Image: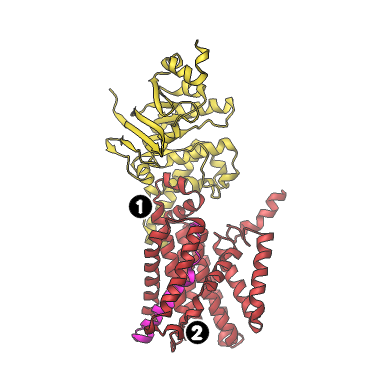
Chain colours: A red, B yellow
């Protein structure tokens, strides 16, 4: 069998095992409702982090409006299931597509900007989306859209997360993915390699935005409501923190970052006023001691552990 | 007479009040190795940027392989069959050496996003194909042992070679080299000269070379254009250029002659 596919097969088997163990523990109630909630939240955060990493880490376009796309997904999904009474699966699809579509429309003009300018534009965009929602009475305005049924469970969240991780992993290791990496490394050189840089930037942005929509839909269907206050720029920063903590450009880094920070906030849920303090201290220490993030732009692999030995030898 | 590959028709580039290049006309035939020389600030790199679509000429047109290429974007010009290297090396420095070359092959990949995501037969087959092609190219440039190395960790001379290899991976008809010998010692320059001659034969290319190093230019180029203050002051075979009064003036100053 082809080595690429062999690796995929091994990874899928590992995922099935993880799923079986966690689902088993939930079934026998070793994992109670509080931790079950946090595990689902980890899955959702991982989706958000890896999709932001696709834009910020792989393509090098610094976007900080991810919560906006998440909000679009959360609301459109809820409109499908609550207002129109259609199935949850359709809600997920519509949430993904509509967030992606918005990402595409926004991406076309904003991705001409780079660096700080793009960051500011996306930050503003996230706020615009939130304020728009705040003023739409059809979706509940400032009081939020309530009475959303809990369709999300561990199974749905976990397997969607795995599907998205595989999607992004395969994307990175393909010609379009390498185009994105080339843009991050040197846009002028990428251009002279015959790469239509605008096309690939918009592609990465659209894909990242759609997955944020998926995560938003899972989110609103787990917590019974979609509220504008959930999707402030603080949420965007939360996601960015996960990505930067893990290391920009490292997918395993984003996964670990999302897991770690979700656990930290779960532990700190008894004293929420300390949560942001610890968050910021973590970031400051990290930026001082390891500015490239936990994994840098490397993926977690056996090679990483060999690296120390090679340097000595 | 040989077929013309690149025709530059009376182009000028004006930046505000500065005429960086004015009324330049030149041509490159198929299979030719042409040099473009001139003192610092003569506008050589500006000419390169106009040819490769980084700038659109303020006046005049560039024709490549019978089609108008000026006005097209840089990536479209590359897709037409031109590839270049840069005066200051621009590699994808955090990526591996082999990935640098594979990115240049991307243009010739025919599988789409869906094939890549589900990793069907087409994806696997083409990935193997371009990896093989990239490795073949690295072997030619004696870089195969560094294939998995991060590009920024290569020594300077090898980074230059990798940049040329990467440009060749786009399978161009015309290769533009912007000061390939910059920062090289005489021994390396000599090797580079051999390499440039050899790749022209091996890939049946035309090459346009910007260079300061006179021994390199005189040694490999069949025809030379000389620029000064954005204007063409001479053209001809190396022997003519060597004895051209205007060129000596431009390079050494008037006093030398008088």
Left or right position of A54 against B233: right
Q: Which residue is mark 2?
A: A223
Q: CA distance from mark 1 to mark 2?
A: 44 Å
Asked whether A114 falls inside the magenta stretch, the response is no
Asked whether A65 falls inside the magenta stretch, the response is yes
Image vertical order of residue A47 relative to residue B228, above or below? below
In the rendered image, is residue A6 in sight? Answer: no
Looking at this view, name the residue that lies furthest to the front.
B17
* Tag 2 secondary structure: loop
Which chain is disc 2 placed on?
A
The segment highlighted magenta reads A58-87
Q: Which residue is mark 1?
A: B110
Taking depth in this image into account, of B122 and A120 the one nearest to the observer is A120
* Tag 1 secondary structure: loop
In the rendered image, is residue B50 in sight? Answer: yes
Residue B191 placement (x, y as % from top left): 53, 27
- For the point 39% across and 26% down, the residue is B231
Residue B140 placement (x, y as % from top left): 49, 36
Residue A201 lies in quadrant: bottom left
């Amino acid at each position: 069998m082809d080595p690429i596919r062999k690796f995929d097969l091994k990874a899928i088997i590992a995922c099935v095992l993880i799923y079986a163990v966690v689902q088993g523990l939930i079934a026998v109630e070793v994992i109670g409702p509080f931790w079950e909630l946090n595990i689902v939240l980890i899955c959702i955060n991982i989706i958000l982090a890896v999709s932001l990493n696709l834009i910020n880490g792989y393509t090098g376009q610094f976007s900080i409006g991810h919560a906006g796309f998440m909000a679009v997904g959360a609301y459109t999904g809820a409109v499908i299931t609550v207002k129109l009474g259609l199935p949850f699966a359709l809600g997920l699809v519509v949430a993904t597509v509509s967030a992606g579509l918005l990402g595409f429309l926004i991406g076309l003009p904003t991705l001409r900007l780079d660096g700080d300018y793009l960051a500011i534009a996306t930050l503003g965009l996230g706020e615009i989306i939130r304020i728009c929602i705040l003023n739409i009475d059809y979706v509940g305005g400032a009081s939020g859209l309530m009475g959303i049924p809990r369709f999300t469970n561990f199974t749905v969240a976990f397997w969607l997360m795995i599907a998205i991780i595989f999607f992004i992993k395969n994307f990175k290791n393909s010609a379009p993915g390498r185009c994105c990496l080339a843009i991050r490394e040197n846009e002028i050189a990428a251009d002279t390699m015959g790469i239509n840089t605008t096309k690939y930037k918009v592609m990465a942005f659209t894909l990242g935005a759609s997955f944020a929509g998926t995560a938003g839909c899972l989110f609103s269907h787990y917590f019974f409501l979609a509220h504008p206050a959930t999707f402030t720029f603080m949420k965007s920063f939360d996601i960015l923190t996960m990505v930067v903590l893990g290391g920009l450009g490292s997918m395993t880094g984003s996964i670990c970052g999302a897991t770690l920070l979700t656990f930290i906030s779960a532990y700190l849920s008894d004293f929420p006023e300390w949560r942001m303090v610890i968050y910021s201290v973590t970031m400051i220490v990290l930026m001082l001691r390891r500015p490239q993030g936990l994994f840098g732009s490397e993926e977690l692999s056996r090679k990483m552990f060999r690296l120390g030995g090679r340097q000595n030898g | 007479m040989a077929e013309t590959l690149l025709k530059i028709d009376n182009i000028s580039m004006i930046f505000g009040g500065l005429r960086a290049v004015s009324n330049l006309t030149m041509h490159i035939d198929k299979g030719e190795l042409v040099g473009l020389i001139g003192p610092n600030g003569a506008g050589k790199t500006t000419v390169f940027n106009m040819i490769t679509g980084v700038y659109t000429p303020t006046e005049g047109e560039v024709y490549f392989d019978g089609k108008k290429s000026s006005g097209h974007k840089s990536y479209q010009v590359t897709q037409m069959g031109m590839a270049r290297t840069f005066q200051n090396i621009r590699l994808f420095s955090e990526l591996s050496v082999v990935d640098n070359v594979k990115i240049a092959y991307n243009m010739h990949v025919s599988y789409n996003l869906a094939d890549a995501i589900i990793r069907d037969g087409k994806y696997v087959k083409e990935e193997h194909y371009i990896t093989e092609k990239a490795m073949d190219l690295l072997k030619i440039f004696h870089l195969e042992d560094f294939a998995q190395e991060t590009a920024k960790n290569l020594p300077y001379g090898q980074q230059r070679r990798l940049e040329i290899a990467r440009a060749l991976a786009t399978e161009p008809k015309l290769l533009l080299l912007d000061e390939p010998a910059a920062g090289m010692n005489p021994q390396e320059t000599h090797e580079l000269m051999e390499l440039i001659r050899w790749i022209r034969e091996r890939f049946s290319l035309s090459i346009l070379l910007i260079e300061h190093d006179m021994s390199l230019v005189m040694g490999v180029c069949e025809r030379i254009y000389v620029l000064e203050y954005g204007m063409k002051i001479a053209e001809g075979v190396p022997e003519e250029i060597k004895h051209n009064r205007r060129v000596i003036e431009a390079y050494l100053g008037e006093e030398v002659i008088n």
